[in-house]
Image (cartoon, rainbow, N blue to C red):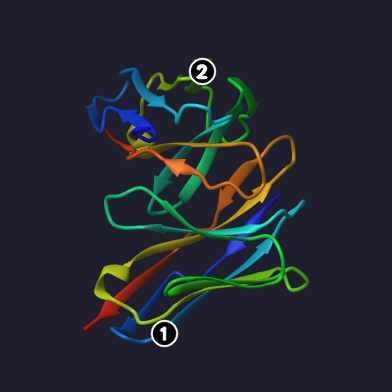
Amino acid sequence: DAGVIQSPRHEVTEMGQEVTLRCKPISGHDYLFWYRQTMMRGLELLIYFNNNVPIDDSGMPEDRFSAKMPNASFSTLKIQPSEPRDSAVYFCASTLAGLNTEAFFGQGTRLTVV
Amino acid sequence: GQSLEQPSEVTAVEGAIVQINCTYQTSGFYGLSWYQQHDGGAPTFLSYNALDGLEETGRFSSFLSRSDSYGYLLLQELQMKDSASYFCAVRDQGGGFKTIFGAGTRLFVKA
């Protein structure tokens, strides 16, 4: 397997624009996580899915953020409208079910909102 | 809720041993993990402890004391390539298997 694949790797957009980040998890993994990483706040869990169903979205900062997982091989994180404070690296990770399974991370999307 | 505390920075010299501590508070504890992240890269898994004691994997070891809500990552024979950020993380089964990360410890290895 090629691992978790995220696109785009870099995104620069203007404030107010819609941004869509994409993630393809490892085939067969039951869980998919979206994290945001900044220097100030570290790695924050935004939302996670189990078998395509959102389980906990309490980390989503505002209604401007939304995430979907229409099938087992694809998820999106959308920000509409984007703001400069959304600038961060967004990681997607996937895992198998179980307590001692490692999280496999994608390479991240570096988002810059100007 | 969950919280994890670890030092923000540690500096050590090549060949030395360094210990990165982590204390945690969780509503339900099912194990402590450690991840490494190089600048510009993604976090990668290093180790997992569910039970008390020391787990060794090559130059890296991880320790857990459940009664003290404490763990550490031990890096031996430090190499320059070990310069990175190290995160402790807990897996919480509340409603699923979400993984929560600490703020990370930046390790600087000097020649």
Q: Quadrant of the C terminus of chain A?
A: top left
Q: In this view, does B95 lie above or below B7?
A: above
Mark 2 and mark 1: span between their CA atoms? Answer: 44 Å
Which chain does the residue under circle 1 lie in?
B
Q: Name the one closer to the observer, A85 or B13.
A: B13
Does the CB distance between marks 2 and 1 fall below 8 Å?
no
Where is mark 2, residue-wise?
Answer: A68
Residue A36, quarter of the rendered image: top left
Count neighbours of disc 2 (C-alpha within 10 A) and say few if under 14, some if 14 to 19, many if 20 or more: some
Element marked by disc 1: loop
* Left or right relative to A106: residue B74: right
Residue at 36%, 87% in the rendered image = B16
Could you tell me which chain the residue with mark 2 belongs to?
A: A
Q: Vertically, is B49 above or below A82?
A: below
- The residue that appears at 61% across and 30% down in the rendered structure is A57
Q: What residue type is labelled 1?
A: Ile
Seen in the picture, residue A34 relative to B106 is either above or below; the reply is: above
Q: Which residue is drawn at 47% across and 39% down?
A: A35
Q: Which of B96 and A46 is in front in this view?
A: B96
Q: What residue type is labelled 2?
A: Lys
Q: Residues within 10 Å of mark 1 (few under 14, many from 20)?
A: some
Q: Position of residue A76 (x, y in %)?
A: 43, 21
Q: Is residue B64 left or right of residue B46?
A: right
Please provide percent x and percent y for residue A32.
53, 31
Q: What element carries label 2?
A: strand
Discs 2 and 1 lie in a common subunit: no
The answer to whether residue B73 is left or right of residue A9 is right
In the picture, residue B62 is in which quadrant? bottom right
Residue ID for mark 1:
B17
For the point 67% across and 47% down, the residue is: A99
For the N terminus of chain A, the image quarter is: top left
A88 relative position to B99: left or right: left
